[in-house]
């Protein structure tokens, strides 16, 4: 036996041993019968009710939980995905972009929760890189921002204050993910065909509902045929399974950059990502290679948001602008577009409050949300100017000293709890 044959045999033994260990580790997660159980649905009900138990639909489902869970489990065991209880989509416009979000009812969320918590997440998270910072336990926006600052600090120690950052963004990310790529990911990580079939059936169910409602005749038949052959694109916004698949689909790209090209300073949060290097030419070459991998996955980079920037000029990542000062200090600031957007919102809120279409409590909550966001950056002047505008428009409702000064007067605005007590005891004073 030659040395090449021995090496080939050793690699085969290592792969077989690795596959055996993986099979043993995920023997319960990669098994349809152990995942789809009444006990798992009961546990999922507590998680799905958290924060929405006040809704009528949730209370109705909870009252009939035994019947609903039994019906769903029996249907899934017979290989039939229950019909979607709601297919209506909500159209939102976020910074000028049109987004269609599917509100998932608790009956549909239950199946997705069980599938994600007991099959998809335990198996798929094992293959993700550490700096893939979205939608996993103990990760999120704060985690991604801290990791970014950590990478920048290390880059300053290695390269000094001047280096280059490649920031990239996928174009129409959720709408462009191919169903075939989702199936390929499932085939790589699962052996149980029922787990894979149920996952793909849920992904396709929302597209199928749109086709049935929108098209007729031969056109509908053609589109349904493409859907059955996994030739369609797009996963719906709002689904838990869509979130997991959006994490895993570009995983090949993550491992290529980190493992094969050995770029240490790399981070991705859903469709946004960045790479740090001291060589601009290396980043240009890397981007060309990344485009090839993205094409294989069926994804496309957004040319307007993908660029290579010098660290001293600054870049925007997750709504915060980062810049490296000549001394090596990391300067974080709010984006100008975000500040302008919030000022316009407050002026619009003033008109809505005057018409009676919005309450001051809603304005206060929105302002509190923005103030919490400002804590991630150096924002003293932006915060001061925004509070001045809020003070002028709403008399500083619950936030500034102006409100504290007038709230006890005759024309002062009462707190919501005070309004309730005075209304209850019929002692509201003019």
Image: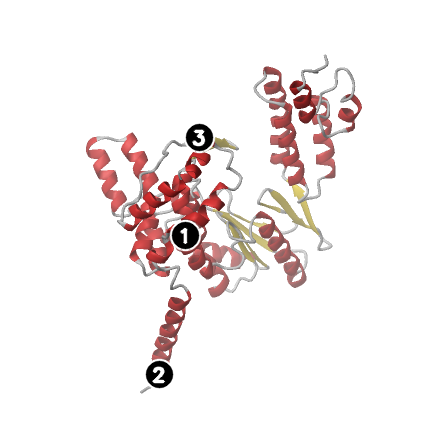
Across and down, in percent, residue 261 comes to 49, 63
Q: Of all residues shown, which one is farthest toward the right? A: 405
Across and down, in percent, residue 53 comes to 50, 37
278 or 266, which lies in front? 266
Across and down, in percent, residue 364 comes to 65, 29
Q: Residue at x 73, y 22 (%)?
A: 395
Question: Which disc number belongs to residue 395?
Answer: none
The residue that label 2 is drawn on is 6
Crowding at dot 3, Cα within 10 Å, few <14 / some 14-19 / many 20+, comes out as few
Q: Of all residues shown, which one is farthest toward the bottom? A: 1
**Which secondary structure lies at badge 3?**
strand
The residue that label 3 is drawn on is 91
Tell me, yes or no, whether the two marked residues, 2 and 1, touch with CB atoms within 8 Å. no
The residue that label 1 is drawn on is 39
Across and down, in percent, residue 163 comes to 62, 56
Crowding at dot 1, Cα within 10 Å, few <14 / some 14-19 / many 20+, comes out as few
Quarter holding the C terminus is top right
60 or 18, which lies in front? 60
CA distance for labels 2 and 1: 49 Å
CA distance for labels 3 and 2: 60 Å
Q: Nearer the viewer, mark 3 or mark 2?
A: 3
- Residue 241 visible to the viewer: no
Crowding at dot 2, Cα within 10 Å, few <14 / some 14-19 / many 20+, comes out as few
**Which secondary structure lies at badge 1?**
helix
Q: Residue at x 39, y 61 (%)?
A: 28
In the picture, measured across the screen, residue 249 lies left or right of residue 392, that is: left
């Amino acid at each position: 036996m030659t040395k090449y044959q021995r090496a080939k045999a050793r690699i085969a033994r290592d792969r077989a041993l690795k596959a055996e260990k993986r099979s043993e580790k995920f023997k319960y997660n990669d098994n349809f019968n152990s995942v789809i159980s009444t006990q798992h649905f009961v546990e999922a009900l507590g998680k799905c009710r958290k924060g929405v138990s006040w809704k009528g639909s949730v209370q109705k489902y909870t009252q009939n939980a035994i019947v609903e869970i039994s019906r769903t489990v029996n249907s899934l065991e017979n290989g039939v995905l229950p019909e979607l209880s709601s297919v209506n989509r909500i159209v939102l416009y976020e910074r000028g972009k049109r987004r269609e979000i599917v509100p998932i009812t608790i009956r549909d969320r239950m199946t997705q929760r069980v599938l994600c918590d007991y099959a998809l997440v335990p198996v798929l998270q094992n293959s993700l890189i550490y700096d893939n910072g979205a939608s996993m336990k103990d990760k999120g926006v704060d985690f991604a921002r801290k990791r970014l600052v950590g990478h920048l600090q290390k880059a300053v120690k290695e390269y000094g204050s001047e280096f280059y950052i490649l920031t990239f963004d996928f174009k129409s990310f959720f709408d462009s993910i191919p169903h075939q790529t989702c199936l390929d990911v499932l085939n790589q990580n699962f052996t149980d065909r029922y787990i894979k079939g149920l996952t793909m059936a849920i992904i396709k169910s929302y597209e199928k509902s749109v086709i049935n409602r929108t098209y007729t005749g031969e056109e509908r038949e053609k589109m349904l045929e493409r859907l059955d052959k996994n030739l369609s694109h797009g996963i719906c916004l709002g689904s838990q399974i869509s979130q997991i698949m959006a994490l895993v689909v570009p995983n090949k790209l993550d491992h290529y950059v980190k493992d094969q090209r050995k770029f240490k300073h790399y981070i991705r949060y859903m469709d946004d990502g960045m790479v740090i290097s001291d060589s601009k030419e290396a980043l240009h070459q890397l981007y060309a290679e990344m485009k090839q991998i993205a094409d294989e996955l069926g994804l496309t980079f957004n040319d307007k948001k993908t660029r290579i920037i010098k660290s001293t000029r600054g870049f925007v990542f997750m709504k915060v602008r980062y810049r490296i000062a000549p001394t090596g200090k990391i300067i974080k600031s709010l984006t100008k577009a975000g500040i302008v957007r919030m000022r316009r919102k407050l002026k619009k809120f003033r008109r809505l409050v005057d018409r009676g279409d919005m309450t001051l409590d809603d304005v206060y909550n929105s302002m509190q949300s923005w103030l919490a966001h400002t804590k991630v950056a150096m924002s003293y002047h932006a915060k001061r100017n925004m509070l001045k505008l809020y003070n002028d428009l709403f008399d500083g409702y619950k936030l500034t000293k102006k409100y504290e000064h007038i709230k006890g007067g005759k024309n002062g605005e009462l707190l919501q709890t005070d309004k309730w007590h005075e209304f209850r005891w019929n002692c509201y004073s003019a």
